Image (cartoon, rainbow, N blue to C red):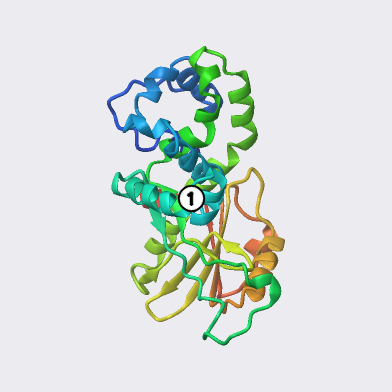
């Protein structure tokens, strides 16, 4: 299996184990139709415990899968009170269905008397919720909404929605692989001590890592069928400045490589990784 296909399959099937027979195809859309339209009940049985398919667990998991994962945004979207929602989220973490990615954002109020701008007063620093298994994210992000149709063998609406929004599935898995690749890249000479995605009131970043010698590495990941141009680096630098992040090294990750202009850039503070570099993780 080619590396690109492996990433795509993992973004859907990751975590289901080896105890189920799968129909493999060269393209991911045929695979999804064969396995999730024609064999819906077989895959629904993999969602465990089964009560996750019922309210209010279902609504919370759908909100995580279909949104940005911010804790209180999820509970609001799921129409669950914070008290009940926090209890359910903790249960889902204990079940190893979800994990919490802690916010690294500093509070806007530096001391009790610090006055905030009007538009900042309702802002809340939030942790993010992530699925442990890509399969569960796929199920609650794409399958659950169409379960009545799929149970009857009707897959047109499901497949149309999947084709339209599949990009977000691949992108998150690719970001996680790129984060692991960056850690490996620095392992021999300057260990990464903190990494992952980063978000604050101003913006969101795919990767923000800090090395042992306090260097800040800011990363952008593009899983697109076109080369990344220098304009992407310019936009990333502008976002960093707006967010008040002092960056030592920029890292760009691209499925389809880079423009000649970017490849010829002689900056010591720039790292470029393409899809083939992921082979170092194997």
Q: Position of residue 201 (x, y in %)?
A: 61, 68
Is residue 34 or residue 81 the one in the foreground? 81
Is residue 254 or residue 99 the one in the foreground? 99
Is residue 76 or residue 3 the one in the foreground? 76
Is residue 197 or residue 112 the one in the foreground? 112
Q: Position of residue 69 (x, y in %)?
A: 51, 51
Under tag 1, what secondary structure? loop
Q: Quadrant of residue 122?
A: bottom right
**Residue at image coords 47%, 43%:** 60
**Residue at image coords 50%, 39%:** 62
Q: Residues within 10 Å of mark 1 (few under 14, many from 20)?
A: few
Asked if residue 42 lies left or right of residue 26, the reply is left
Q: Position of residue 263 (x, y in %)?
A: 63, 62
Q: Residue tagged by mark 1? A: 81
Placement of 267 over or under 257, stated as above or below: below
Quadrant where the image shows the N terminus: top left
Placement of 264 over or under 70, stated as above or below: below
Q: Quick check: can you spot residue 110?
A: yes
In the current view of this chain or complex, which residue is farthest to the top?
Answer: 152
Q: Position of residue 175 (x, y in %)?
A: 50, 53
**Residue at image coords 41%, 31%:** 53
């Amino acid at each position: 299996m080619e590396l690109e296909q492996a990433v795509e399959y993992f973004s859907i099937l990751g975590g289901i184990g080896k105890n189920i027979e799968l129909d493999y195809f060269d393209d991911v859309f045929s695979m999804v139709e064969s396995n999730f339209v024609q064999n819906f009940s077989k895959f629904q049985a993999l969602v465990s415990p089964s009560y996750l398919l019922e309210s209010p667990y279902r609504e919370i998991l759908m909100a995580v899968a279909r949104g940005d994962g911010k804790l209180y945004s999820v509970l609001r979207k799921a129409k669950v009170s914070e008290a009940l929602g926090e209890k359910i989220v903790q249960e889902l973490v204990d079940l190893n269905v979800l994990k919490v990615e802690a916010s690294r954002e500093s509070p806007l109020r530096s001391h009790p008397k610090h006055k905030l701008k009007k538009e900042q007063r309702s802002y809340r620093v939030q942790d993010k919720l992530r699925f442990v298994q890509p399969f569960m994210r796929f199920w609650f992000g794409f399958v659950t909404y169409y379960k009545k149709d799929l149970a009857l063998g009707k897959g047109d609406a499901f497949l149309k929605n999947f084709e339209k929004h599949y990009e977000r599935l691949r992108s998150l898995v690719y970001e996680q692989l790129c984060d692991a690749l960056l850690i490996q890249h620095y392992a021999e000479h300057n260990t990464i001590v903190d990494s992952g995605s980063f978000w604050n009131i101003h913006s969101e970043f795919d990767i923000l890592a800090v090395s042992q010698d306090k260097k800040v590495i800011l990363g952008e990941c593009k899983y697109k069928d076109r080369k990344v141009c220098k304009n992407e680096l310019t936009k990333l630098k502008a976002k960093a400045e707006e967010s008040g992040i002092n960056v030592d090294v920029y890292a760009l990750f691209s499925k389809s490589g880079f423009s000649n202009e970017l490849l010829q850039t002689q900056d010591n503070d720039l790292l470029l990784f393409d899809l083939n570099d992921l082979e170092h993780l194997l």
